Every structure is written in structure tokens, then in C-alpha cells.
Image: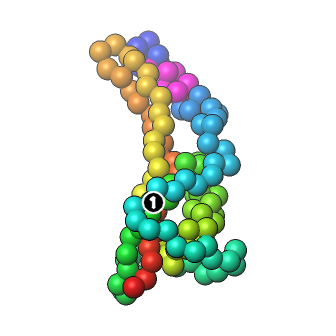
Amino acid sequence: MKRYRLIIYLLVTALIISGCASTGFLMAKAKVTLLGESYPAKSEDAKIDVYMTNKPTQEYVEFAKITCGDTNDKWSLEQITKKAREIGTDGIIIIGKAGTSGVGVPIGNSTYIVSEEYGMTAVAIKYK
């Protein structure tokens, strides 16, 4: 019985610590990795197509990867869209999260891990 209390106590402690700990990514800025040529910047209010579940129906070229490692998805998308305008993107395809963070708690012969995904990664596209 005492062993189960200890396990529960350690798991709850790990959850509390991981929930309160700063990841250091608050207000992160987007980073670009060019895979091809760059294009002229677009205006700050230019429309950028965002694809999350489907790919564009028209032909396109992938020319950059844009990543933002913030814990707030709305902020990450705003930063990626802002960076997309700077590199002349017509649209972005969201391809997943930027990374994971976690805490491991060793208990006996096992380790219990609590992890969380954060950030956003997108591919910048230019329509043909």
C-alpha cells in the first residue's frame, strides 16, 4: 500500500512540476530554413493560405521550412505566418509540432515519463 502511495505522490509531483515549469519558449520567434530560392517579401496584411488537414489543390513548390517553438499554438501560427510573408510565401502547410519536453521519474526498475509536445512546424510554398 505504501508503495502505491509513493508512486501516486511522485507522479502527481512530476505533473505539477512539468505544469508549472517554464519551458523557456514563451514568445518564441519563428526560424526559417530555406530549401530553395527566396522570393520578394509580401506586405504585412497579405493573405497567406494555411493548410492544416489538406494539401493545396493547385501545383506548388516547397521552398522553406518554418518552425516556431512556443508553447502557445496561436502565437506559433502568428509567428510562422509573419515569417512566411517576409520570405514571399503564398501558403504554408502545417506538418506537425516543433518538439517535445518531458520529465522522467525513476521508480524501482521503471521510469515514468510525462511529456508534452510544443510549437509548430510548417512548409512554405509558392504556387506555380
In the rendered structure, which segment of residues is drawn in magenta?
Answer: 7-14
Q: Is residue 5 above or below residue 116?
A: above
Whether residue 120 is visible, yes or no, is: no
Foreground of the two, 88 or 55: 88
Residue beneath the point at 44% across and 21% down: 105
Quadrant of res 26: top right
Instruction: Classify mark 1: helix, strand or loop.
Output: strand
Q: Residue at x 38, y 16 (%)?
A: 107
Confirm whether residue 70 shows in the render. yes
Image location (x, y in percent) of residue 63: 41, 67
The amino acid type of the residue labelled 1 equals: Leu
Q: Main secondary structure of the magenta part?
A: helix
Which quarter of the image is occupied by the N terminus?
Answer: top left
Residues packed near mark 1 inside 10 Å, few (<14), some (14 to 19) or many (20 plus): some
Q: Position of residue 12 (x, y in %)?
A: 53, 28
Residue at 39% from the left image edge and 85% from the top image edge: 128
How far across and how far down the image is residue 17, in percent? 59, 28
Of 127 and 27, the residue lying toward us: 127
Task: Answer above or below: position of 23 versus 82.
Answer: above
Question: Measured from the top left, where is residue 69 in percent x and y?
Answer: 55, 48
- In this rendering, the answer to whether 12 lies above or below 58 is above
Q: Residue 9 or 93: which is nearer the viewer?
A: 93
- Give the residue displayed 40% in from the left and 65% down from the top: 36
Is residue 30 located in the magenta-colored stretch of the structure? no
On the image, numbered disc 1 is attached to which residue?
34
From the viewer's perspective, tell me whether residue 5 is left or right of residue 25. left
Is 11 one of the magenta-colored residues?
Answer: yes
Q: Can you say whether 87 is above or below 43 in the image?
A: above
